Amino acid sequence: MRGAAKREPEPRVGAPALQTGGIMLVRNLNEPEVLTKAIDRSGKHFDAETAGADVELFQEDLIRGYHTDILDMDKGEWQSLCRRDGLIDLVDTFEDVAVENEEGPIRLGITQAADGENPDVVKLYEGMFAWNGWSLSAPPPGRGVPRNDDASQAKDPVEQSTDRG
């Protein structure tokens, strides 16, 4: 442009540091018949059992969750991403049983419309899990802020998970 004052170029800055939510394992569910077949198979098993007939089950009929491991290249060992110590609350006896070094399951999530408009339409989330460096089955260390956002009432994760109130 004629007559326009020249300006110094703005200093260039680098891109911001990369931030990530960890790694995510996903399933490719582009073929809806995979889910449809599983639901149909489940319905047929239920109908056969209700009628008193023998039901033949296959491996895919019995999977109710997954345990996930990752290879630690430095140690050359597989490490569980689902390892946890648990506390089982027995309802009948009101006892608490401590369980150490167990693996919690990863389960797939399936959703329906919140308004109930289309009860026959379901969505299966393709993400199996996202891992950011902590167990997928145990709460991270530190205190959690309760639902009312009052930080003065923050509890230890163990207290929070066993709070019955």
Image: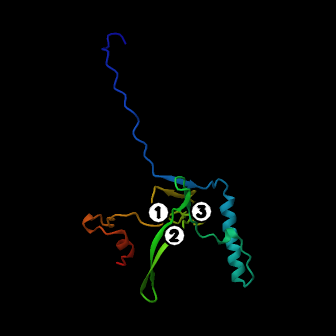
Closer to the camera, 85 or 8? 85
Cα separation between marks 3 and 2? 29 Å
Task: Identify the element where label 2 is drawn.
Answer: loop
Apparent side of residue 23 relative to residue 32 in the rendered image (left or right): left
Tell whether label 2 touches label 3 (CB within 8 Å).
no
Residue positioned most to the front: 75
Residue positioned most to the bottom: 93
Mark 1 or 2, nearer chain start? 2
Q: Residue at x 45, y 74 (%)?
A: 86
Task: Identify the element where label 1 is drawn.
Answer: loop
Residue 63 against residue 74 in the figure, above or below = below
> For residue 111, what is the image quadrant?
bottom right
Task: Identify the element where label 3 is drawn.
Answer: loop
Closer to the camera, 98 or 19? 98
Mark 3 or 2, nearer chain start? 2
Closer to the camera, 112 or 152? 152
Label 2: how many residues lie within 10 Å, few (<14), some (14-19) or many (20+)? many
Q: Which mark is residue 104?
A: 2
For badge 3, the amino acid type reads Val
Cα separation between marks 1 and 2? 9 Å
Q: Which residue is mark 3?
A: 121
For badge 1, the amino acid type reads Ser
Label 1: how many residues lie within 10 Å, few (<14), some (14-19) or many (20+)? some
Nearer to us: label 3 or label 2: 2
Quarter containing the N terminus: top left
Q: Which mark is residue 135?
A: 1
Tell whether label 2 touches label 1 (CB within 8 Å).
yes
Apparent side of residue 148 relative to residue 111 in the rendered image (left or right): left
